[in-house]
Amino acid sequence: MKASRVMTKDVTCITPDFGLERSWSLMKKLNVRHLPVVFSGRLVGIVSDRDLLLRALVLEGGAISFPPLAVGEAMTPHPITCQPATPVSRLAALMLEHRIDSIPIVSLKDELIGLVTSTDLIELLTEPDTVTDVLPFEFNVKPADDQAAA
């Protein structure tokens, strides 16, 4: 199975000058944990909820506030990317190896065309198996009593 089959194609992107507070609000509104960062049509980074929380200030009562920084200062620049034809097993291996939860899928020109997250990969496990339980040959099952009489 290839990345193009499991990737999310409708991905919301932001630019490097997007504010941290605004990025956090957008993540919460969209219920996502990653936002690809695009500049002039090309992927330049990715920001995760963890990246933002590392910069957050926790106020009295547990409220979160962010310094007035641009996401370009908090994002992971030049993230690990893959092509649409990359096998899903390779995506999973890269996520484990680099301890990341998303991989942008890009064209040969670094244009973002999708995003594969660890959630996308886990959802594959919930799909019904395509393998049938029917064996490719006939089985003639005899009760044990018939076996003893033979």
Image (tube, helix red, strand yellow):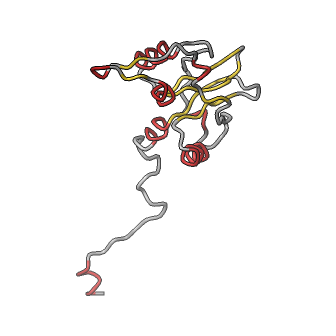
x then y, percent, for residue 30: 43, 18
* Quadrant in which the N terminus appears: top right
Count of numbered tags: 0
Relative depth, front residue between 16 and 56? 56
Of all residues, the one furthest to the bottom in this rendering is: 149
- In the image, is residue 1 above or below residue 23? below
Is 107 left, or right, of 24 in this rendering? right
Q: Position of residue 144 (x, y in %)?
A: 26, 80
From what the image shows, is residue 142 above or below residue 84? below
Q: Nearer the viewer, residue 108 or 80?
A: 80
On the rendered structure, is 61 left or right of 86? left
Task: Specify the farthest residue to the right.
Answer: 109
- Identified at 59% across, 34% down, the residue is 103
Q: Quadrant of the C terminus?
A: bottom left
Q: Residue furthest left?
A: 145
Farthest residue, direction front: 60
The residue closer to the viewer here, 147 or 116, is 116
Residue visible at 45% across and 36% down in the picture: 119
The residue that appears at 63% across and 31% down in the rendered structure is: 105
Quadrant of the image occupied by residue 3: top right
Q: Quadrant of residue 12?
A: top right
Q: Residue at x 41, y 15 (%)?
A: 29
Is the residue 150 above or below the residue 57 in the image?
below
The x and y percentages for residue 56 are 44, 23
